[in-house]
Image: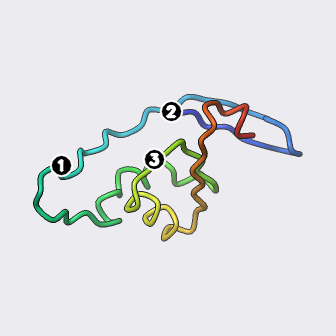
Amino acid sequence: MEVVTIENDSLFHRETRSKKRHQPHNRSNEPEHHSSSSHHHLLETILDYQLIVARGMGQAAYEAISASGREAICTPLHTIEEAL
């Protein structure tokens, strides 16, 4: 994942971080018991983030991010530069 730091409305710093492996969701016809607590691996990776911008994420990930006090935004844009 790419991490950018914005200061004074400009890109100040950019780095690449490893994303902890995301466990696949239940793809069977059985009801899915997937809660925001199952995204603890994601939250460990983003402890120093204030805002998460992604091209997509599941509802449980969105809820886990929001519950942690961070803002999550989904965008159709393809690059960080477009999203900024």
User: With respect to residue 26, does 11 lie above or below?
Assistant: above
Farthest residue to the right: give it: 8
**Gap between marks 2 and 3 measured at Cα:** 9 Å
Q: Nearer the viewer, residue 69 or 34?
A: 34
N-terminal label among 1 and 3: 1
Disc 2 target residue: 17
Query: Is 65 placed above or below 80 here?
Result: below
Residue 44, how many percent across, how many down?
42, 52
Q: CA distance from mark 1 to mark 3?
A: 25 Å
The colouring scheme, among rainbow, by chain, secondary structure or one colour, is rainbow
Image disc number at residue 45 = 3
Q: Is residue 77 above or below residue 71?
A: above
Which residue is at 61% across, 29% downward?
15
The residue drawn where x is 59% and y is 41% is 76
Residue under the point 57% across and 50% down = 74
Left or right: 6 as drawn, with respect to 56: right
User: The C terminus appears in which quarter of the rendering?
Assistant: top right
Front position in the image: 50 or 29: 29
The residue under label 1 is: 27
Whether pointer 2 and pointer 3 mark residues with C-beta atoms closer than 8 Å, the reply is yes
Whole-angstrom CA distance, mark 1 to mark 2, is 28 Å
Q: Are marks 1 and 2 in contact (CB under 8 Å)?
A: no
User: Which callout, 1 or 2, points at the residue further toward the start of the chain?
Assistant: 2
The x and y percentages for residue 40 are 35, 57
Q: Is residue 38 left or right of residue 57?
A: left
Question: In what element is the residue under mark 2?
Answer: loop
Q: Nearer the viewer, mark 1 or mark 3?
A: 1
Q: Tell me the kind of residue under disc 1.
A: Arg
- Which amino acid type is marked by label 2? Arg
**Secondary structure type for disc 1:** loop
* Quarter of the view holding residue 23: top left
Q: Earlier in the sequence, mark 2 or mark 3?
A: 2
